[in-house]
Amino acid sequence: MDLLANLGLGLSVALQPHNLMFAFLGCLLGTLIGVLPGIGPTATIAMLLPITMGLDPATSLIMLAGIYYGAQYGGSTTAILINLPGESSSAVTAIDGYQMARRGRAGVALATAALGSFFAGTVATVILVLFAPPLAKAALNFGSAEYFSLMVLGLIMAVALAHGSILKATAMIVVGLLFGLVGADLYSGAQRFSFGIPELADELNFVAVAVGVFGIAEILRNLENETDRDVMVKKVTNLWPSADDFRRMAAPVVRGTALGSILGVLPGGGAILASFASYSVEKKMSKTPEEFGHGAIEGVAGPESANNAGAQTSFIPMLTLGIPANPVMALMIGAMIIQGIVPGPNVVNQNPNLFWGLIASMWTGNLMLVLLNLPLIGLWVRLLTIPYYLLFPAIMAFAAIGIYSINSNPYDLYALALFGALGYTLVRFGCEPAPLLLGFILGPMLEEHLRRAMIISRGDPTVFVTRPISATLLALSVIVLVIVLLPSVRRKREEVFVEEE
Amino acid sequence: MTFNRSDLGAGAIFIAIGLFFGVTTLLELDIGTARRMGPGFFPIMLSGILIALGLVIALKSVAHEEEPRGPLPWRGLVVLLSVPVIFGVLIRPLGMVPVLALTTFITSFASARMSLKAAVLLALGLTVFCVVVFNLGLGLPLRLFGPLVEPWTRPIFGVR
């Protein structure tokens, strides 16, 4: 069977010693940044992108992916042990996980999170294997009109699922789109917004934009009020859950996995939305909803499975359509472009090693993460107490070196400072940075497909609604917009995101 | 009359960015027609949308309460935003080692909790770490010592 052959190919790539090593390195780094405060996977992957340029494409993406899902594991550790989610997708885990820890069940909570994540990771890998190739095949028929409409849908979903104000999120996307246009125009070669500075003639360096908006802005936010972290659980014992615990977590893990797998594919929310949805589902389905908030194991098992499943299925649109579902996927696309691979439906045919190797590595990576997280938990607990003022100078140093090493271009560093300032200001004014980065990556593609579609149709804009797939996608965009703007949904949406704070 | 200053500020920034791109497009770029879009078509469309969004966001700020925010980290702002610029300006003449030590030392003082001794140790330690990992380990093409300091470092470290 094709599937087995493909899976075999993937495993043979993922099990090569150097790929195993870099997957391990990625998982280790991911767990580390998940545990450490003030640096998320987006900024880390952005900083490490330049360093992976020397590796071969499959290895580089395997390592970067490891960082991404490794951070989900590490983030839940801090959520459970010190009530501070290391990653936003672990925010819900903190509610019941921390309560479990306060009752001396920290070990069980950690094991539940790790085992649930592993189960979810395994299932999500199978889902990728099953659904990615047919989707890529379907996408091969996409013309420019379809791509344009697909990106519009993606961006609108990103707005709908972003935190906070819809208007602000939309504006952030447009800002990103505009900055994405700096540099030479694809069709006429005209210089745009480069003001005669040769260093700006190519385009703004997206690593600088990403690290500025996510990295520097995040450090500044942490410097607003520096506090020491208080670790209540100094030593974690009794890792293994009891038979009763296993019985209670089974159904939530399965439901969380299903929810996460579906929501992860959607642009915008992915892992974060999945964990919130799972928590509210578990609370509604529970026979003892009053236990939630006081250490219910279901409240850890469900969301943790959901966020890991979501993290993994968010690779589907990236690998098959070349469209990012979240900022990390946008960086993955950037990594492919740096490596000379054109993201899109052709990746599965032209780079089968990369495609299947990356998918298979997710399973080996998840296995490594269980081993990394449970037996080594003591080490991570000790890392929790590293003071922040020792960390951020290191982050800045790595960022500067990483960015400079891409093109040896000092302007990239000036862009870093500029986008750090812009990012922090906008975050302080209540805008989310994620839509900006999505817009920035999609900007050039969106324009290219818009213009190409218009040239092919000889200036007839109805091409977007007369081609059935394009029309369907645009109709979906309108429906999403209408739903989000409905008064009742708007109120509900605000509630969901307030609960998160 | 009350304003929500976050919304007002965000709106103002969006309008400013929209104007910046819009005016530049009008002055420098060919907009073309819908049939043959010039390099200015997409930017002018986006600038228009952004200015409109900015206006709506700014107008909606009127008569909304302000939500409380933490104090501005002035030290951090000044330090973190100038460090990349310092790094960019000095990396070519000085090379990676001196620049890294200097910028790390400066960065440390973004936090009010940093002591002089810790900053010096951190700068030295991090510089050694970065040279080992990035230069010796990963072989990134970064010059360790630039032309400005090389005459002094060459006798000790050789040409790097």
Image: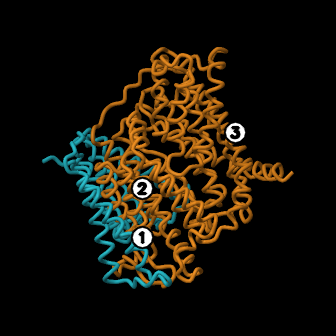
Viewer-side residue, A28 vs A355 = A355
Colour in which the image shows chain B:
cyan
Please determine if labels 1 and 3 lie on a single subunit.
yes
- Upstream in sequence: badge 1 or badge 2: 2
Q: Chain of mark 1?
A: A
Residue positioned 49% across, 70% down in the render = A444
- Residue position marked by numbered label 3 in the rendering: A123
Q: Is residue A88 left or right of residue B110?
A: right
Q: Chain of mark 2?
A: A
Q: Please, what secondary structure does the residue beneath circle 3 have?
A: helix
As measured in the structure, the alpha-carbon distance from the residue carrying label 3 to the one carrying label 2 is: 32 Å
Please indicate, yes or no, whether residue A43 appears anywhere in the rendered image.
Answer: no
Tag 3 near tag 2, CB within 8 Å: no
Answer few, some or many: residues within 10 Å of disc 2's Cα (few below 14, many 20 plus, some between 14 and 19).
Answer: many
- Residue position marked by numbered label 1 in the rendering: A409
Numbered label attached to residue A211? 2
Q: Is residue A104 left or right of residue A242?
A: left
As measured in the structure, the alpha-carbon distance from the residue carrying label 1 to the one carrying label 2 is: 16 Å
Residue positioned 31% across, 83% down in the render = B27
Tell us which disc is closer to us: 1 or 2: 2
Viewer-side residue, A380 vs A317 = A317
Colour in which the image shows chain A:
orange
Please indicate, yes or no, whether residue A122 appears anywhere in the rendered image.
Answer: yes
Tell us which disc is closer to us: 1 or 3: 3
Q: Position of residue B123 (x, y in %)?
A: 35, 49
Outermost residue, right side: A1
